[in-house]
Amino acid sequence: MSTRLPAVTVVGSINLDIIATADRLPAAGETIGGGSLHQQPGGKGANQAVAAARLGASARIIGAVGDDASGRLMLESLSGAGVDAAGVAVLDGDATGTALIVVDRDGENQIVVCPGANSRFAVEGLQFGPDETVLCQLEVGLPLVLEAARHSSGFFVLNAAPALDLPPELLERCDLVIVNETEYELIPALAEAKLVAVTYGKDGSAMFEHGRRVAEAPASAVTVANTIGAGDAFCAALVLALRAGLDYSTALAVANAVGADAVGDPSSQPALARLEEYVARVAGAGVAGQ
C-alpha cells in the first residue's frame, strides 16, 4: 500500500440533515410521538468528502449551498473537517439542500431529500488534474454527473445512488461504480460495467468485473446507531484503498471496517481513524488477501 493517499475531489450534494429519532418508523398516514429532533451536516457528497478527509486524504468538494444560515453552517462544517470547500458555490435565491430523516431504535431510516441549491449548480469550466480521483453520486442529477465525467481524465468513480438508469457514455467512463444490493438489482446495465462494488449490509461486500464476482469480504459485527452515513464512509474508504494499491479483497475489507465504525456513530459524518489504521486492523484479523 502506498503511504500517500490520493487527492480526491467529490462532486455532489451538500445538505442539512434534520433528523427525528423514534422507537419505530411510522406507517403511511400514521403519527407517532416521543421522538427527539436534531440537526447536523449531511448530503452524500459532503459525507463522502468529510470521510475522505478524516481517513487522511486531501479532499475537496464541488457543490452548492444557498445564501442562508444553513449554507454558512455547511461551509463551516466542511472546512472544520479539513475539506477544501473553495469550489462550493453560494447561490442567491436558493435554499440549502435539506434532508428530512426519521430513524428508528435499530438505526433504520426513511429519508426525503429537498435538493434546493444542489439542483442548480454547474461544472462549466471546471478542470480536474490527470492524477485527480473524482467521486460523484446521483443526488445532484445525471446531467451534472455526466458533465463531470467528461471533464475528468483521471480515476472516475460513481456511487450510483439513488438508483437511476445510467447512459452508456457515463457507464463506459466509470472506472468504478459503487452500489448497494438493491441499487445493483435496479440498474441492470451494471452487469456489463468494468468494475462494480456491491454492499450487502451485514453480509459484507463484493467486487464484480463485467458481472463476474471476483472478490468479496465479510462485514464486521457492530451495534447499529445510524446507517445514514455508513455507505458514504464505505465509498470514500474503498476509493482510497484501491487507489493506494490494495487488492480488491483487502480494499473491500478495509471499507467494510470503516463502514462498521460509521454505523456505530450517530452522526451522518462520523468520526473515523486514518486509513492505515483500518488496513492494520484488517491485516491483524487475517482478512486481507482472502
Image (spheres, rainbow, N blue to C red):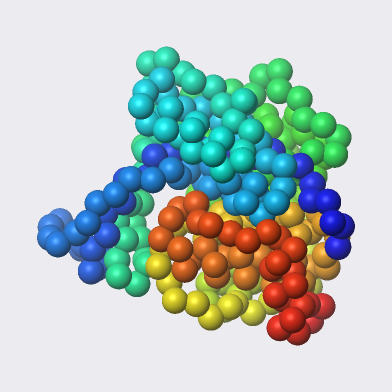
Question: Residue at 24% of width from left, 51% of height from top?
Answer: 37
Q: Position of residue 242 (x, y in %)?
A: 79, 59
- The relative height of residue 215 versus residue 34 in the rendered view (above or below) is below
Question: Residue at 54% of width from left, 67% of height from top?
Answer: 261
Left/right of residue 184 with respect to residue 93 in the rendered view: right
Q: Can residue 74 be seen in this view?
A: yes
Left/right of residue 129 with respect to residue 46 in the rendered view: right
| Front residue of 20 and 261 | 261
Q: Position of residue 111 (x, y in %)?
A: 36, 51
Q: Is residue 177 visible?
A: no
| Front residue of 265 and 156 | 265
> Residue 200: which quarter of the image?
bottom right
Count of numbered circles in the view: 0
Q: Quadrant of the N terminus?
A: bottom right
> Residue 110: which quarter of the image?
bottom left
Q: Where is residue 203 in the image (x, y as percent from the top left)?
A: 57, 78
- The relative height of residue 269 versus residue 81 in the rendered view (above or below) is below
Q: Where is residue 214 in the image (x, y as percent from the top left)?
A: 78, 73
Question: Residue at 50% of width from left, 56% of height from top?
Answer: 270
Q: In which quarter of the image is the C terminus?
A: bottom right
Question: Residue at 75% of width from left, 72% of height from top?
Answer: 280
> Residue 283: which quarter of the image?
bottom right
- The relative height of residue 82 versus residue 56 in the rendered view (above or below) is above
- The relative height of residue 112 versus residue 264 in the rendered view (above or below) is above
Left/right of residue 214 with respect to residue 15 in the rendered view: right
